[in-house]
């Protein structure tokens, strides 16, 4: 019995441990994407059913258009770096939802939500691109899956086989792991290192998509001005502090532009 357990454990480790091309790190995901993604897709559909999706407005179209450009940029980067087909299981979707919360989030497999409350802070297309780059980066770097592996696994128990999570308590755990929701205190913030990673990768892909990565610094200045109000953790979290974040972005933006030039991008929309 012990031996079987050991073999199973070793097998799971081999299956789950992979190097992420964006972070260059080996990440241990207890659940492979083939199990995580269907769960995420089902939860996303349910979220859209339970919330008001904005359709046909200029903002809604902008969120979709920018999302498509950003994920296409990620695809180009991956292909150029020897990972063609890496995103084959992703099912990109970008929705604007009517909700005053200053928030946006990404679920594994490329399911993105923007809340209408973040649009005034995004301010323009480049601002949307900065948020989109950050959110898409969380999805690309498997941050949700890692968080689920680390903290919420035991609580979730044997949920992996169930596609739709019907038990409300387990569903809540799942949504917390992915930062889904708008209620303060319900979402778990990403760790500082995940946030920093998402900022760096986000700048890279927004630049390849043709947006000026320096716009992300201005976005975070606007976030900082807003953060006096009570707000959900993903977007107005204090870690990394807004000032650290802005400094990092200003340091990384020229590097992101340099990388984008390798892809023939010579002008950057601001
Ligand atoms: Zn984040």
Image: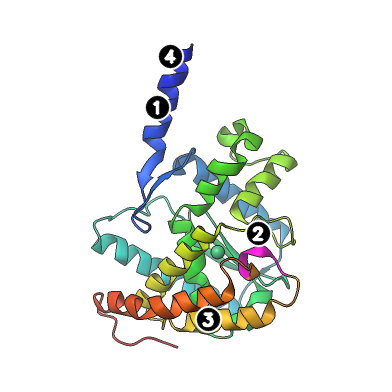
Q: Is residue 234 magenta?
A: yes
Say which mark, if any, is on residue 127.
3
Q: Is mark 1 within 8 Å of ligand 1?
A: no
Residue identifier under label 4: 3
Residue segment shown in magenta: 231-235
Residue 35 image position (x, y, % from top left): 50, 39
Residue at point 48% right, 53% down? 109
Residue at point 30% right, 60% down? 78
Going from the N terminus, do you reach mark 3 or mark 1 first? 1
Q: CA distance from mark 3 to mark 4?
A: 54 Å
Q: Secondary structure at mark 1?
A: helix
Q: CA distance from mark 1 to mark 4?
A: 11 Å
In front: mark 3 or mark 4? 4
Number of other residues with Cα within 10 Å of mark 3, as a class: few under 14, some 14 to 19, many 20 or more: many
Q: CA distance from mark 3 to mark 1?
A: 44 Å
Say which mark, if any, is on residue 140.
none
- Tell me which image quadrant ligand 1 sits in: bottom right
Main SS of residues in magenta:
helix
Q: Looking at the rendering, in which quadrant would you find the C terminus?
A: bottom left
């Amino acid at each position: 019995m012990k031996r079987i357990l050991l073999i199973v454990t070793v097998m799971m480790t081999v299956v789950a441990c992979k190097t992420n091309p964006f972070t260059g790190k080996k990440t241990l995901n207890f659940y492979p994407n083939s199990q995580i993604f269907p769960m995420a897709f089902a939860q996303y559909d349910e979220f859209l059913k339970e919330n008001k999706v904005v359709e046909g407005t200029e903002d809604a179209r902008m969120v979709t258009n920018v999302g498509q450009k950003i994920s296409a940029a990620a695809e180009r980067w991956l292909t150029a770096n020897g990972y063609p087909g890496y995103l084959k299981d992703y099912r990109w979707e970008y929705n604007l939802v009517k909700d005053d919360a200053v928030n946006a989030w990404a679920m594994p497999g490329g399911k993105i939500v923007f809340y209408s409350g973040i649009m005034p802070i995004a301010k323009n297309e480049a601002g949307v691109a900065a948020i989109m780059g950050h959110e898409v980066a969380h999805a690309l770097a498997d941050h949700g899956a890692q968080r689920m592996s680390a903290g919420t696994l035991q609580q979730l128990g044997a949920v992996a086989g169930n596609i739709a999570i019907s038990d409300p308590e387990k569903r809540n755990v799942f949504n917390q792991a992915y930062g889904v929701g708008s209620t303060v205190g319900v979402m778990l913030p990403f760790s500082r290192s995940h946030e920093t990673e998402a900022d760096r990768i986000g700048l890279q892909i927004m630049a390849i998509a043709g947006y000026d990565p320096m716009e992300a610094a201005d976005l975070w200045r606007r976030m900082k001005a807003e953060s006096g109000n009570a707000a959900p953790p993903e977007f107005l979290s204090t870690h990394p502090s807004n000032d650290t974040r802005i400094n990092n972005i200003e340091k990384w933006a020229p590097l992101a532009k340099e990388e984008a030039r390798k892809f023939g991008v010579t002008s950057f929309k601001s």
